[in-house]
């Protein structure tokens, strides 16, 4: 259920707490609460979910998530300067915001969350891809989250959602789409942020599939895809030599021409090839 945001405009909050953006922390803040509420709505029905937010900063998206009805938000922020502003939000939404100060790369959030869990973040660009890969490649599947709603540089968002044959198609598209539906749900120009970054941004929504889209052993699929895209301009029979000396036979058995290049091979074909490699 949507409730009106009871707090002062973000510009005032930033000024009052002297939150000048730091480049080293990837700080580009969203100030428009209509926009943060719109992003929060892309995460789905939050009323029965705990939400993990990395990098709340002064709390624009946090406020969007809470006013859009999130049961609880766990926010992990590295910049201690933001904590007083976040405390004001916690006071305005009693028992619904828990803030941890620290580096999201070193904190296990699970002890503080109750399933079902969704992740929604305007990620710091310097750690965004690393966190995404961690969330997509957990030790166990299903992962701890039901969906990820994440802001990235537009170019990274395109790599996540790319189709076979696209220039942006590669390892990130395959890792993401093997076990998730992934789509761009909001596109934002640099001016949507303060200060504006050099590039455009986009929010990607990834929802977990109950089963991988096609059967394959994860480690083998990862190995094949990494080798294929490390030398993306080479034909597969040569880029995949390191995977197996019998790779040409395996490619034939998977229905893939050995003269194809990685960007022409669909996710389904990569999974078929991973199954052939795993048999050997
Ligand atoms: N969510 C806010 C918004 O939308 O306006 C801020 C987004 S800003 C792009 C990224 C935020 O992540 C900053 O507040 C920054 O301090 C924080 N941050 C950067 N690196 C971090 C890390 N390793 N762990 C947790 N937070 C981090």
Image (tube, grey):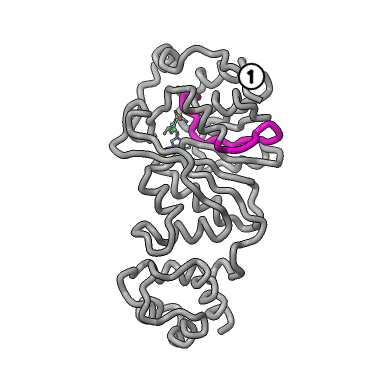
Residue at horizontal 39 percent and vertical 41 percent from the top: 125
Residue 266 within the magenta-colored segment of the rendering: no
Give the quarter of the figure containing the C terminus: bottom right
Residue at horizontal 49 percent and vertical 71 percent from the top: 270
Decide if residue 52 is on the left or right side of residue 230: right
Is 124 placed above or below 86 here?
A: below
Residue pointed to by mark 1? 93
Looking at the image, which is closer to me, 240 or 176?
Answer: 176
Ligand 1, image quadrant it occupies: top left
Number of marks present in the image shown: 1
x then y, percent, for residue 11: 41, 16
Is 23 placed above or below 17 here?
A: below
Badge 1 marks a residue whose secondary structure is loop
Is 109 placed above or below 249 here?
A: above
Residue at horizontal 40 percent and vertical 20 percent from the top: 19
Decide if residue 44 is on the left or right side of residue 80: right
Residue at horizontal 35 percent and vertical 26 percent from the top: 194
The response on whether ligand 1 sits within 8 Å of label 1 is no
Is 267 placed above or below 68 here?
A: below
The quadrant holding residue 180 is bottom right
Q: Main SS of the magenta segment?
A: loop
Decide if residue 155 is on the left or right side of residue 266: left
x then y, percent, for residue 264: 39, 69
Residue 53 within the magenta-colored segment of the rendering: yes
Tell me if mark 1 has few (under 14), some (14-19) or many (20+) residues whose alpha carbon lies within 10 angstroms of its own: some
Looking at the image, which is closer to me, 16 or 171?
Answer: 171
Looking at the image, which is closer to me, 216 or 188?
Answer: 188
x then y, percent, for residue 154: 37, 44
Decide if residue 233 is on the left or right side of residue 158: left
Q: Which residues are magenta?
A: 42-59
x then y, percent, for residue 1: 66, 25
């Amino acid at each position: 259920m949507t409730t009106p945001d009871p707090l002062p405009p973000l510009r005032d909050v930033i000024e009052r707490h002297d939150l000048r953006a730091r480049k080293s922390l990837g700080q580009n803040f969203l100030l428009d609460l209509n926009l943060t509420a719109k992003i929060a709505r892309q995460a789905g029905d939050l009323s029965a979910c705990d939400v993990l937010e990395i990098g709340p900063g002064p709390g624009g998206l946090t406020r969007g998530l809470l006013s859009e009805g999130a049961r609880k938000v766990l926010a992990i922020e590295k910049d201690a300067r933001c904590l007083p502003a976040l405390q004001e939000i916690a006071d305005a939404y009693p028992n619904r915001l828990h803030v941890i100060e620290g580096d999201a790369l070193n904190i296990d959030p699970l002890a503080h969350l109750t399933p079902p869990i969704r992740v929604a973040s305007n990620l710091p660009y310097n750690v965004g891809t690393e966190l995404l890969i961690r969330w997509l490649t957990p030790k166990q599947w299903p992962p701890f989250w039901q969906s990820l709603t994440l802001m990235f540089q537009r170019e990274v968002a395109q790599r996540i959602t790319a189709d076979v044959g696209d220039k942006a198609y590669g390892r990130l598209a395959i890792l993401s789409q093997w076990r998730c539906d992934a789509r761009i749900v909001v596109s934002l120009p640099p001016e949507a942020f303060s200060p504006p970054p050099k590039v455009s941004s986009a929010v990607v929504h990834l929802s977990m599939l109950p089963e991988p889209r096609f059967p394959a052993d994860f480690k083998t699929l990862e190995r094949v895809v990494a080798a294929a895209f490390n030398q993306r301009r080479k034909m597969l029979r040569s880029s995949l030599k390191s995977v197996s000396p019998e790779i040409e036979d395996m490619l034939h058995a998977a229905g893939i021409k050995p003269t194809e290049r990685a960007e022409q091979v669909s996710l389904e074909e990569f999974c078929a090839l991973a199954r052939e490699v795993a048999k050997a």
